[in-house]
Image (cartoon, helix red, strand yellow):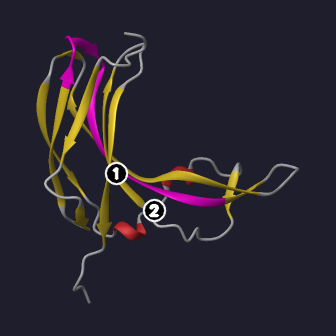
Amino acid sequence: MVFGIGEGRIEIVLPKTNYVGGETIKGKLVLTLNQPKKAKGLRVELVARQKQIQRSRSAKGGTVVTEVDVYRFPSQLKGEGEFTSSEYEFELKVPDMPSAVPNPKLELIPGVLSISAPSGYPMMWYVTASLDLPMSLDISKKVQISVSSKTGSA
């Protein structure tokens, strides 16, 4: 197959799709391959993305709306080696304050873009999985979940 397309698939199995801060997501990753594959690794991540309104510092100015990862918690399920069709259980911890997750990515690129104001966009949460195939497109999957703050807190 060309560039990994059609060589297999990943399914992310979750018992539910609604979580609260501090909860642990327990799931299963089902890897289905047409034939054994050498790969750099298999990982699953909890990712929060948010649209950000940014003002360009270029001569033309203007604003741009981009998606930025504001939270990323990766978990390596298996390191480099040969992979066959298998199932892997995983656990990912949701941060205690999911609506107030800092944005470390923007701190890494000061002076390039600046936040003009709070975006007003909600964070979108995903569980993602990928098999890192060398010199080929990765086999990957993304499932959207809902994350809310703990209720009943004073």
Q: Nearer the viewer, mark 2 or mark 1?
A: 1
Alpha carbons under labels 2 and 1: distance apart: 17 Å
Q: Residue at x 33, y 32 (%)?
A: 140
Magenta run includes residue 43: yes
Q: Position of residue 143 (x, y in %)?
A: 31, 47
Which of the 4 quarters of the picture holds residue 48?
A: bottom left
Task: Identify the image quadrant of the N terminus.
Answer: top left
In the rendered image, the vertical position of residue 41 relative to residue 14, given as above or below: above
**Label for residue 102?**
2
Residue 81: mark = none
> Residue 106 in the image: x percent, y percent?
57, 53
Stretch of the chain drawn in magenta = 32-53
Decide which of tag 2 and tag 1 comes sooner along the chain: 2
Q: Amino acid at mark 2?
A: Pro
Residue sitting farthest toward the right = 59
Is 8 magenta? The answer is no
- Mark 1 burial class by Cα count in 10 Å: few <14, some 14-19, many 20+: many
Callout 1: SS = strand
Q: Which residue is mark 1?
A: 126
Seen from the viewer's position, the closer of residues 144 and 80 is 144
Q: How many labels were placed on the picture?
A: 2
Image vertical order of residue 30 relative to residue 37, above or below: below
Give yes or no for contact between labels 2 and 1 (Cβ–Cβ under 8 Å).
no
Q: Residue at x 22, y 41 (%)?
A: 12
> Residue visible at 24% across and 64% down?
18
Place residue 21 in its image quadrant. Answer: bottom left
Q: Quadrant of the C terminus?
A: bottom left
Quick check: 98 above or below 131? Answer: below
Q: Amino acid at mark 1?
A: Tyr
Q: Looking at the picture, how far across and down is residue 103, in whole percent?
A: 49, 58
What predominant SS class does the magenta segment belong to? Answer: strand
